Structure formats: structure tokens, C-alpha cells
Amino acid sequence: EEDGSLDKTLTTTQMKVLDWTAELEVLARTLISQWCETAIFSNSGAIEKIIADTGLPAGTDGGCLMVRPGEIVLSHFKVKRADGGIGKSRKPREARVLDLTDD
């Protein structure tokens, strides 16, 4: 028989609503950034194992993926919208990485 203390119902009676301010926005973004850094650090071993097992490119601290010419990647492409504007494709498509430094 289950114990009632394991009830995971979320109650909103004690939630506080804060008015938006630029200072609150910066604080929230800083908190999320720190949380992401902690999550990446604590999962770095698993991330490295996935990279080694799959051969997928590794990202950098700046969030860029390092790819080599000839690799196949998924990429969004520029598309012309019905209204004449420019956007990106809805679905990524396979693309081959080119090296534009070769003559």
C-alpha cells in the first residue's frame, strides 16, 4: 500500500510573482548559465564517451562545433518565403562541409 507522503502534486499557493526588471533578467540568465556550466561539467565524462563512440564532432566552449571538410552535417538553409522575405528551412537537411581555402 502506498504512503500518501509520496504525493508529488504541485501546489501554487506559495508561489511568488515578481515584476520584470532588467536586473532580474540578468540575474535569471546568470543563474541559468551557471546551471548549464555545472550540468556540462558533471556530464563531461558521458559527453566525451558519446563523442568517442559515435565520431560526432565535439563542441567548443563558445558553442561552436568543429567539423572537417568532407563531413556530412545537418543544416538549415536560407529559403524565400511566400511574402518575399528570407528565412530558414523548417527541417534541417544533410550538407557536406566544404573547404573554401583550396584553390
Image (cartoon, rainbow, N blue to C red):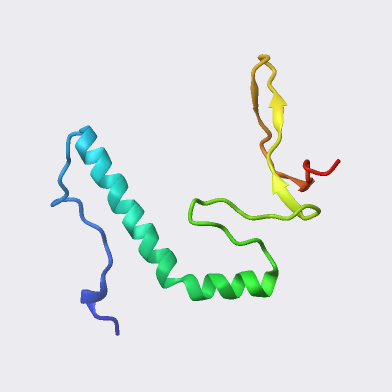
Q: Going 86% across and 40% down the picture, which residue do you hit?
A: 103
Residue found at the very far right of the displayed protein: 103
Q: Decide: is 26 above or below 70.
A: above
Q: Going 40% across and 65% down the picture, which residue do you hit?
A: 39
Q: Decide: is 38 above or below 77.
A: below
Residue 42 locus on image (x, y percent):
41, 72
Residue 67 locus on image (x, y percent):
69, 55
Q: Nearer the viewer, residue 20 or 96?
A: 96
Locate the N terminus by quadrant: bottom left
Displayed quadrant of residue 87? top right
Q: Nearer the viewer, residue 101 or 47?
A: 101
Q: Going 29% across and 49% down the picture, which residue do you hit?
A: 30
Q: Going 76% across and 48% down the picture, which residue do you hit?
A: 97
Q: Decide: is 78 above or below 56.
A: above
Residue found at the very far top of the displayed protein: 83
Displayed quadrant of residue 90? top right
Residue 7 locus on image (x, y percent):
26, 70
